[in-house]
Image (spheres, grey):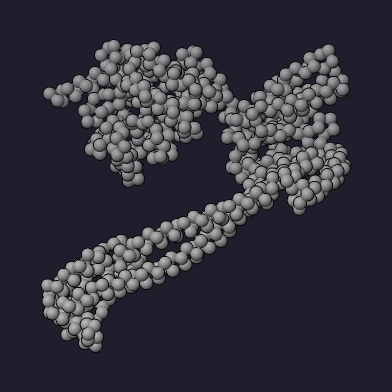
Amino acid sequence: MKTFFELEHRLGYRILRWVLSVALVSGIVLSTTQIILDARRVSHDLDQQAAQTLALVRDAATQAVFSIDSELAQQVVDGLFQQKAIRYARIAHPDGEPLAESVRPLQSESFRPMTDPIFRPERIYSIDLTRRSAPDTRYGILQVHYDTAHTAYTWLERATLTFTSGIARAVILGLVLYFVYHMLLTRPLLRIISSLTRVNPDRPDDRLLEVPSGHDRDELGLWVNATNNLLVAISENQKKHLEAEDRVSRLSRYDHLTGLPIRETFLGMLGGAIEDNRRSKQILAVYCCGIDDFKGINEQFGYQAGDQILQEIAQRLSSDTGESQLMVGRLGSDQFVLVEHHLKDSYQAAATAEWLLGKIGESIPVGSHAVRVSATMGIALFPADSSHADQLLQRAEQTMTLAKGTGKSGDHFQYYVARVDQEIRERKKLEKDLSMALAQQQFHLVYQPQINLESQRVIGAEALLRWTHPDRGLIPPDEFIPLAELNGTIVEIGEWVLDEACRQAALWAREGTPIRIAVNLSAVQLKQANIVESVLTTLRRHAIPPGRLELEVTETSFMENLEDAVDKLKELRSKGISIAVDDFGTGYSSLTYLKRMPVQHLKIDKQFVQDLLINDEDTRIANTIIDLGKSLNLTVIAEGVETEEQEYYLRQRGCQLAQGYYFSRPLLPADFEIFVAGFHGRLAEHVT
């Protein structure tokens, strides 16, 4: 289809370009010629008009000169000035001494630089003043200067109309010619090309070309019929070749029992997949899977049942691959191999391995029995374990063999590198513990005060999630939050965090400390269709005014689906909820999206604050964010303030709010209340 559009544009626009070019050039040449001829005629008319004017006043001017009557001469000159085109008029004696004269300046018009070279700024006309009784005696001279602006303006209007109408006629004529050509030739050709693009190269005779309407017996119709005959002949020849090739290929490249690619064939497919992932710089996983105790299955149920089990497993692996991009092959006996493309990390391969083992472990009907089999799997990763297809497959097989030799029961997998294997297992264990942490009340919130640097008052608090693991103790948020976002539990956890933070804010408000509470909103939560209603319901449940809630989103959290994120945040903002951009400066930092987002607060990431006044680059970045906030009328919040010097500098630079260990670490609710009372108490003492 891409070629079809290229051909359409190449031919259609080329014809249109040529037709319009010829028509425009012709129109320009004809219009220009007409304008030049009109300019010559106007110039001639101007000369004739001047000659007629001089002839009309000649006798009166002669009488004035003959009688040396300056009053009469001035009347003649004033009469000439009734014509707006006359700029200067003079009646003079033969020696040049003027008897009467008048002058006015040339009109200043914007078009004069265009018309003056054609008609000249002014034209000078003069005649000798003689009497009919003595034609040879010269009594004086009458001289008139014509300002060409009036005549030039009339000519320019007419020339503009002539040129415009000429171009318009040329364009219309060109479009009409193009339309006729399109209807007679280009349009039928496009229909033929469209029919040709729908031809299946594997079965050319399934969809033959359509003859354009009205062209059954002309050259186009003959061409289509000849092409259709050729397509039919090609199709018949292809069928014969494909049948022969399929028989040979199937025997040499695929397993006769399962229909899956054999080792040699699969290695070629694996090599292509490696190159594809090398270009995209992504991870590829090879899964080598062996059925546990397949010899015992054959002995118990017979070899025919064993073949049936292998066929069923092959069918499951090749036809039901979920969302993964899997290639499947058979290495021989009870071993299968699979390849998964475009993985983000090795942890994703572990999820696929568990899913595959689950599919294999489903019961298989064999006669009157339902047989359950287990499998052991070895995993090798590209590029970490190898960048060559044969080595990667070999290491996956070796890992599977080692995993079977550990003596563990079936349905387990192992990575080629022991360290990676251990990391994945620890992460899987942590994921399992995380799924139960909320139900077992292992989460709690701490609150870090947010200080108004100008008033030195506590105006808010950021609610921060903490997880106390029963065995490992306190687990850093940077370790379990990404995991919660990956497996989706962040949605339920985020709802709990919002509910708990609002509950605490409502409690503080009833006790006389109404402060704003800031809650982080993850990218996964922002994608939820009901996120707006969920937030509003929580506020209503705890009777919290929307203005006391601030939702913090990171720059990267809304870039995957910007339009949807903007709509949801605007709806939240319309209800009175504040929106803050967290860790500003570490992500995209685009003024385009910042202008579109309903943001009230910018939070300077702590990495720019911790080296403030030490690292010039970090200092410049912090200053830029503060200035940006001022220019956009946004409140700027500095995170990670740890020293008095940082607090003083930020306050002097105009940063409105700050939080960090200089003021207080994140506190439990009771400790937070004590801190607020003590902080404001010290401020009151200082004021006193």
- On the image, which quarter does residue 579 sit in? top left
Q: Position of residue 18 (x, y in %)?
A: 58, 58
In the image, what residue occupies the spot 32% across and 21% down?
A: 547
- On the image, which quarter does residue 618 sit in? top left
- Which quarter of the image is occupied by the C terminus? top left
Q: Position of residue 189 (x, y in %)?
A: 69, 49
Of residue 520 and residue 289, the one placed in the foreground of this image is 520
Task: Answer above or below: position of 171 versus 386.
Answer: below
Q: Position of residue 60 (x, y in %)?
A: 19, 74
Task: Answer above or below: position of 268 versus 321.
Answer: below
Q: Position of residue 610 (x, y in %)?
A: 34, 37
Q: Is residue 355 left or right of residue 435?
A: right
In the image, what residue occupies the spot 34% across and 19% down?
A: 546
In the image, what residue occupies the spot 68% across and 41% down?
A: 273
Q: Is residue 163 left or right of residue 267?
A: left
Residue 191 visible in the snapshot = yes
Of residue 463 and residue 45, the one placed in the foreground of this image is 45
Of residue 448 and residue 250, the one placed in the foreground of this image is 250
- Which quarter of the image is occupied by the N terminus? top right
Of residue 41 and residue 599, the one placed in the foreground of this image is 41
Pick out the residue farthest to the bottom.
Answer: 136
In the image, what residue occupies the spot 62% across and 44% down?
A: 278
Residue 639 visible in the snapshot = no
Q: Is residue 87 left or right of residue 187?
A: left
- On the image, which quarter does residue 128 sit in? bottom left
How many discs appear?
A: 0
